[in-house]
Amino acid sequence: MATTHAPPSPTPFGADDLLATPRRVLRAFDRLLTGRFWIVVVVGLATAISLFTAFPTYDKFEPGSKDWKAIERLSEHPFDQKGLDANKDRAYNFTFRAAVPLAGRALGLGPWGYLVLQGMAGLGMFAAAAHLVDRLTRNRRLGALVAIAIGLMWAGSGAFVELRGNFDAVAIALLVAAMATRRVPLVVLCTFLAGWTDERALPAIAFVVLFHHVVESRELGVAKALREPRCLAAAAGLALHVVTRVIVSVAMDVHQPSNLGLEYVKAQLSILPVGAWTGLEGFWLFVLVGAVALWKVRQRFLALAYAGLVAVVCVGSIAVVDVTRSMAYLLPAALAGLGLIHRLCQPKVLRASIYAAVALTAAWPVYYAGGAFTLYWQYPLPLVIVRRLAGIG
């Protein structure tokens, strides 16, 4: 009598099968980072991915706009407010944002040249971030992932898609460079120039101080931070900026413009949640975990100061029209949070935080929030091509 054989039961699909493809991708990714010039590879990847997910609309670029006319005037007549209307002229608002226009004057740049300079700042931001994370973790993969994620948020993509002459990418890149370097003179120079690029960088210098404190100091505490040369260097850059600002104000008889207003806070309160998210996206995880870690080790003052300054920046971001622009200056706060996680948490918490933050950032398209209800989606390259082929403006 013939015997029948039951068909083999299918092998159950498990977690290893689900993760097999991502693991192969990560191994291939690691092979790209094995060379001597791995940071160059990271910068190239971060730039390409940033441009793919948020492509610049150069057809909308207007070199003759009031913003670029203001940059031109500032480069030719720095710290000169004569004949300017504080309520109408952009050049008045740009008075103390002189670093990039003066550099452009020295280099003989026009509007397109400034865009190239801004893009180069974005490349430097990616390189500095990758170096910073690699120095912390001794893991090039994590450094590369953080750099790529920065290119997927406004702080990094703004280096390529911002066409209004705001130069936030330059200021943020200088702040990240001040965190990435251990050379005291460079910390002073970067923080000093960041303040002269945009005043939004000034409160962010506190996060540069915090980062160097948690990474370099043997013990945590305000008194201990005063003994760390790099903390003092960042504070010196801020102090030098304030002193030179006062000297310029008195010597040139110029006045500090103010775009802040309580009426903006009331009108734009509704956009704060999404506006705050667009500033850091998944990197908010670093801020949250870092603050909790400080609290858990009983560094209550540092935890409150850290969270409090982040909250002040959030409120300040809706005191002006450009919410996402202001929130993007919290990137140093996120990197300081990463330093806190590295110091105070287990390595697996650090790795999980980075993977989760990168995934959240990648899942959210590049949006820009401004005003009370306005959200702008920066179109990815495929959609830009489709729109062009379809003749859609």
Image (cartoon, rainbow, N blue to C red):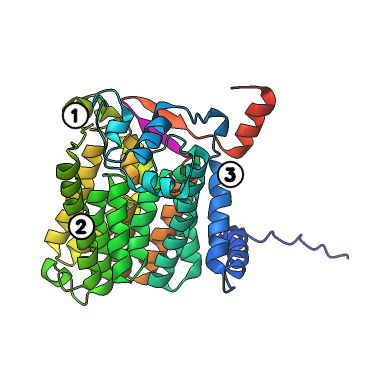
**Callout 3 touching callout 2 (CB < 8 Å):** no
Q: Which residues are magenta?
A: 366-371
User: Upstream in the sequence, badge 1 or badge 2?
Assistant: 2
Residue 54 falls left or right of residue 158 = right
**Residue 342 in view (yes/no):** yes
Q: Label 1 vs label 3: CA separation?
A: 37 Å
Q: What SS does tag 1 mark?
A: loop
Where does the image place residue 118, in percent across and percent down from the top left?
46, 47
**Residue 341 in view (yes/no):** no
- Nearer to us of marks 3 and 2 is 2
* Rendered image: mark on residue 52: 3
Q: Is residue 146 magenta?
A: no
Where does the image place residue 268, in percent across and percent down from the top left?
26, 27
Quadrant (top left/top right/bottom left/bottom right) for the N terminus: bottom right
Please determine whether, in this image, residue 55 is positioned above or below residue 357: above
Q: Which residue is mark 2?
A: 240
Q: Which residue is mark 1?
A: 261
